[in-house]
Amino acid sequence: MKYRKFVSLIALLSFIVMALTGIVMFLAPQSRVAYWSGWELFGLSKRDYDDVHSTFMLLFLVSLVWHTVLNWRSLADYMLSGAKKFFVFSPELFWAFAICVVFLVGTMLRVIPFDQYLSIGGVAKDYWAHSLGTPPWEPADATPLNQFCQTMEVAEEFANQRSVTIDCDEALSVLQSAGIEVNDPSQPLDDIAAENGTTPRDLADLVMSVARTASSQSGGAEP
């Protein structure tokens, strides 16, 4: 096996995967929105893209180190002058370093055109938050069902100035009537959603369907 070619291909392929997942992560909704709405792209969730990006970053770094070891002599030749003296501060290295510094400083200070570029990601995330909805708190998706019912009462009063009561037993009956299997009321919403092929947002809508005004003693759920 040609190890130099093998390692170079690993580095190239892992870099491509890193680039693609990085683009998705840049344009994807924020984690709280993605987890709440069950957002997916090509069958992969936001968490999947994060995990793939992280593991391929490790693979890329390992292959890069391996590539450097295998090609150390060639790399050293780039840093030798015509007199065969080790020449670290070459013009190429200076300009490469300068470009990296410009990108770093420009990003940190959000100057043109870096600010405009980064704003694209912000616009995309705002779009997802508007179209998919945001959780009432973070992390609402990981909140146990029985606790979610109680906390939603507080959230409704804080966000919509509406005092409501939510009977967790009644909410559980509504979920089961909708074909949602709940093993235990203390089970987190995201686990229930994953087991039933739905999203925490959809479960929350069902739970809120039984919300009644605090003064209501009987009757149906408030629309």
Image (spheres, rainbow, N blue to C red):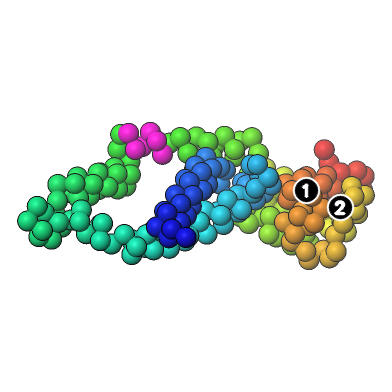
Q: Quadrant of the C terminus?
A: top right
Residue reaching furthest left? 83
Left or right: 174 with respect to 75?
A: right
Residue plotted at (77% across, 45% down)? 202
The percent coordinates of residue 16 (x first, y second) are 48, 46
Count residues near mark 2 (Cα–Cα under 10 Å), then give few for <14, some for 14-19, many for 20+.
some
Residue 90 located left or right of residue 14 = left
Amino acid type, label 2 = Ile
**Going from the N terminus, do you reach mark 1 or mark 2 first?**
2
**Residue 214 visible somewhere in the drawing:** no
Badge number at residue 123:
none
Disc 1 vs disc 2: Cβ atoms closer than 8 Å? yes
Q: Which residue is mark 1?
A: 198
Q: Residue at x 74, y 48 (%)?
A: 199
Q: What is the distance, in whole Å, between disc 1 and disc 2 at their CAs?
A: 9 Å
What amino acid type should be assigned to the residue bearing mark 1?
Thr
Of residues 77 and 223, the one drawn nearer to the viewer in this rendering: 77
Q: Which residue is mark 2?
A: 180
Q: Nearer the viewer, residue 118 or 10?
A: 10
Q: Secondary structure at mark 2?
A: loop
Q: Can the viewer see residue 72?
A: yes
Residue depicted at x 90% and y 50%: 179
> Where in the figure is residue 122, as x and y percent of width and height?
48, 38
* Other residues around mark 1 within 10 Å, as few (<14) / some (14–19) / many (≥20): some
Q: Is residue 144 magenta?
A: no
Residue 20: x %, y % from top left: 51, 44
Position above or below: 23 against 8 = above
Quarter of the view holding residue 80:
bottom left
What's the magenta region?
113-118
